[in-house]
Image (cartoon, rainbow, N blue to C red):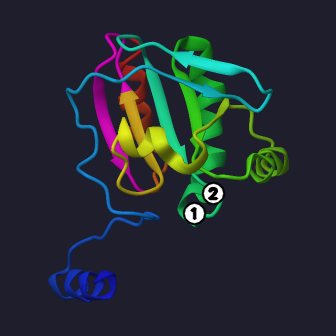
Amino acid sequence: MTGRRAVLGALLGLPLLVACKRTAAPATLAVGDPMPGFRLPTSRAAEHAVAAGTGPFLLNFWATWCPPCRAEMAALDRVHRGLAPRGLAVLGISVDDDVFLVQEFALKERLTLPLLFDRGGELARKAFRVAGYPSSFLVDRRGVVAEVWVGERDWDSAPIRARLEQLLI
């Protein structure tokens, strides 16, 4: 079916979103929906809690087996380094089963953003209803989803940076 969509999109001249997909899921959490609270382990064997009704956050669900996910991580890390001091919490949430593989990737790429582990993607599937990877959720100060992006993004682009900074005003 994916091949047919690509051919149809090419014939119609429609841009197609590039994202890794593992399983079919219901429609993703949408703009205006409240962000669910959650607790996930970190790379330091601690737990990180995110309370419902809080923000601002940029949550990025990703996996090492997903080429578009890997490609955007350096730029996402630059967002973290630039905007975390101003109040935007940027969290990379890996759905990988192998924590050590994620840690190895983070070391190799010199990532500084906090990484949380949703082994097997249960939070991604059930609470955020992620349909493909990478998926990113921008959450405002009230804990409401302000933006949803599915597929690789250019986190260094002026329009995305402007949108992120809007939440910090």
In front here: 19 or 77? 19
Q: Are marks 2 and 1 in contact (CB under 8 Å)?
A: yes
In front here: 34 or 88? 34
Q: Please give the range of residues in magenta.
A: 139-151
Is residue 156 among what the camera can see? no
Which residue matches tag 2? 70
| Residue drawn at x 56%, y 56% as measured from the top left | 69
Name which residue type carries label 2. Arg
Q: Which mark is residue 134?
A: none
Nearer the camera: disc 2 or disc 1: 1
Estimate the x, y position of residue 157 in percent, counting from the top left: 46, 45
Question: What is the spatial separation of the Cα atoms under label 2 and label 1, in whole angstroms?
Answer: 6 Å
Name which residue type carries label 1. Cys
In front here: 42 or 104? 42
Q: Residues within 10 Å of mark 1 (few under 14, many from 20)?
A: some
Task: From the viewer's perspective, tell me whether residue 97 is left or right of residue 43.
Answer: left
Which residue matches tag 1? 66
| Residue drawn at x 62%, y 14% as measured from the top left | 85
Estimate the x, y position of residue 79 in percent, counting from the top left: 58, 33
